[in-house]
Amino acid sequence: MRIMLDFEECLKDSPRFRATIEEVEGDVCELETKLDKLVKLCIGMIDAGKAYNAANKQFVNGIRELAQQSTKDEVIESSLTKFAESLQEMINYHTILFDQAQRSIKSQLQTFMKEDLRKFKDAKKQFDKVSEEKEAALTKNAQAPRNKQHEVEEATSILTATRKCFRHIVLDYVLQINVLQSKRRSEILKSMLSFMYAHLTFFHQGYDLFSELQPLMKQLGGQLDQLVVDAAKEKRDMELKHSTIQQKDFSNDDTKLEYNVDAENGIAMEGYLFKRASNAFKTWNRRWFSIQNNQLVYQKKFKDVPTVVVEDLRLCTVKHCEDIERRFCFEVVSPTKSCMMQADSEKLRQAWVKAVQNSIATAFREKGDDGEKLDRKSSTSTGSLDSSGEPREKSLKGDSALQKVMAIAGNTACCDCGQPDPRWASINLGITLCIQCSGIHRSLGVHFSKVRSLTLDTWEPELLKLMCELGNGVINQIYEARREELGARKPHPGDPRHEVEAYIKAKYVERRFVRRPSDDELKLKVVSLSKQEKRLSNNSEPLPPRAPPPTPTPKQRPASGASVKSEDSGIQRSADGSREMLANNASTNSLNDTEAAVEAEAEAEAPSCCAEAEVCKEQVVFSEPKEYSPGLQLYWASCARSLPDMAQALAHGAEVNWINADDDKRTPLIMAVHGGSLVTCEFLLQNGAGVNQQDVHGRGPLHHATILGHTGQVCLFLKRGANQNAADIDDKTPLSIAVEAANADIVTLLRLAKMNDEMREAEGPYSQSGDETYQDIFQDFSQMASNDPDKLNRFQPYDSSKQ
């Protein structure tokens, strides 16, 4: 309310003026009370705002810490970081708003109260004082008697002076009131308008900030819907796995251990073992052991630095310990120390012992040669020189392996999604993969797919040959035969991972797109493969292109295995009769020049020295089986050296260790030995074939390879953990067979392996030179068997009739 006083009225000092004065004074007093309250509330708001900002800053810091903790999830990290930055900007805007409130409300209104209202109060005091003095002068003047002239004059003089002073004071007071009434409007409005503009700026800046953030929020909203769907799917999958695991039989509560030399993290095997301390008390402590980087290490806690038990597995041996009180113990012995360990069961002990033995063999194969080892190139029996006299590479890595694999038709794009320039491969399937599909294959497990890098990993020659024998085109013809018929869409580069993963599982795990053969088709395939095996074993003419032949008579029994020449000691032939060569172009896996073709033709026309000597009394023959099955197809395809037909049989559900009860309980791996192909054996081993599985005569693949003089296969089986001490029903070991056949190369390999086992069992330290010789010779034999088999053509026939 605005009240303006009239100057003329104030000089009259009328009751109206006095009433107006009282009204103005009451209004100003109330104004002061309201302003004081508003200032105090503003101070409280500012303090609360500062506390809010402080709490908000802590909250934003918590978001930043959560983002830093989520560095492995790029979506969460980037989103939370962006949100934290935006919220920090809002805190800054709040700080500016509170500063403006302090300036516009608190400071301005306090100044108005301290200056203008104080002037009003001072003027009021003077007005009240002079009013009282005026009233007193008027009273004294009225009371002066007439007969006392000097009192009358004195009273009149005081009254005149007092009235004059009153007029000045009342005019100043009225002026101060009118100025205050006018200024209060501007000061209050100015203060509040400034405060409201501060809010306008605050919300405008916030709107601009979140307008820039809105596209990201919409994008995340779309992704969130997919994440909810994926989370629900993962929950269902986990519940299904949980239910499946609960239904399993846990009566044998052994931990499942699996040796995986191709593990991505480099850990071939890991698990808990008890370790006997080397102190005087011989205490036993449970530790987490692992085999990694050709070392045996253990640790107590995950963050602890692993303690190395064995620096180099090539310098150690492992043996069972039956002479101590504790059960399930074994010992790892190195040249400088030994370590006693205890498993939780006999099954786990056997698994660890086998894993250490396989790791030792792997270390021998994978360790690169130094210059001193290459000085041994003058040896005719163990050298690894090519025709130019230069040392041959023990293994291939990087661009060399990549170029050879990429030369196969169809391998220049990912087998499953078509991504160009794949840099990964599945070695048991023989296909190339992009990085996303390789990760999905890895998640399937090594029993479905074993993934290896084409550029980062080292490639053994036999593995590289395996890749060149198959390829994306061959495998897709098998695993995608019914895809178009079923209307299934093949993924494309850039498709969501869950779609690609679902397709890959349907393709390789469920084998949904594989075309199952009819009984007649399967019969024709088996008979055709048996005929191919007969033509290859007779070695009298080149094979025609593979085609389903007419159905043979049930009594057809061509002899084959007895006259097969060792493909590892002479010319190695593929399923179509050509040599097994590393592919150097995209159009062929066979010979690349006329000279090699002439050699193959001459070899085909030459009589088999093995046949003349009757190497093996047993014959690989075909007879009408009781039932045609994918296992039987794998059986004959292994002998016929046809990797595509072997891959097809496995896709149809063939068991890799299938036993032919009608043929001395032989397995596909034994038939691959009789087929003479190193790559065929490698393919079966990569797909889980048992290297020590025996036939009815007690002979495993190592026996048959020794009898047939297949030096490369002997070397391969020994590297894969074959038992060279196993004896057949005639009590013949592979070594005794090789000695009777006077096969120097195989005798050398078997004796070295036997000597290495004896050294492992010895209590004392290793003989350093013997261990190095063992490693070098096996590497050289493996290299020659894969790339230079002619050097191993020193076969001497073995007469099994010698007893």
Image: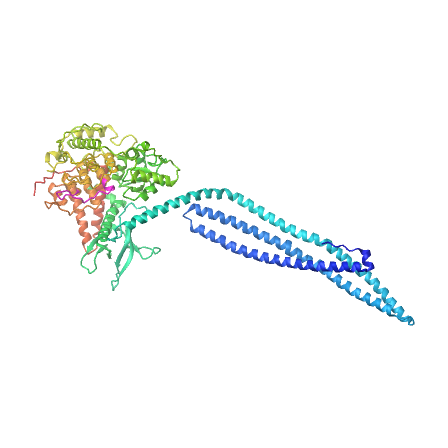
Is residue 326 on the magenta stretch? Answer: no
Q: Residue 563's image quarter?
A: top left
State whether the magenta stretch is mostly helix, strand or loop. Answer: loop
* 517 sits left or right of 153 in the view: left
The stretch in magenta equals 684-700
Q: Position of residue 344 (x, y in %)?
A: 24, 56
Is residue 695 on the magenta stretch? Answer: yes
Q: Quadrant of the N terminus?
A: bottom right
Q: Nearer the viewer, residue 551 or 64?
A: 551
* 68 sits left or right of 656 in the view: right
Q: Nearer the viewer, residue 658 or 132?
A: 132
Q: Residue at x 64, y 55 (%)?
A: 105
Q: Is residue 477 depicted above or below 212 in this figure?
A: above
Kindly give the residue lying farthest to the bottom in the view shown. Answer: 148
Q: Position of residue 374 (x, y in %)?
A: 25, 43
The colour scheme applied to this rendered structure is: rainbow
Q: Residue 173's image quarter?
A: bottom right
Q: Position of residue 576 (x, y in %)?
A: 22, 31
Can I make out residue 242 in this image? yes
* 389 sits left or right of 12 in the view: left
Q: Position of residue 803 (x, y in %)?
A: 7, 43
Q: How many marks?
A: 0
Q: Residue at x 56, y 57 (%)?
A: 48
Can I make out residue 399 in this image? no
Q: Nearer the viewer, residue 521 or 105?
A: 521
Q: Residue at x 34, y 55 (%)?
A: 302
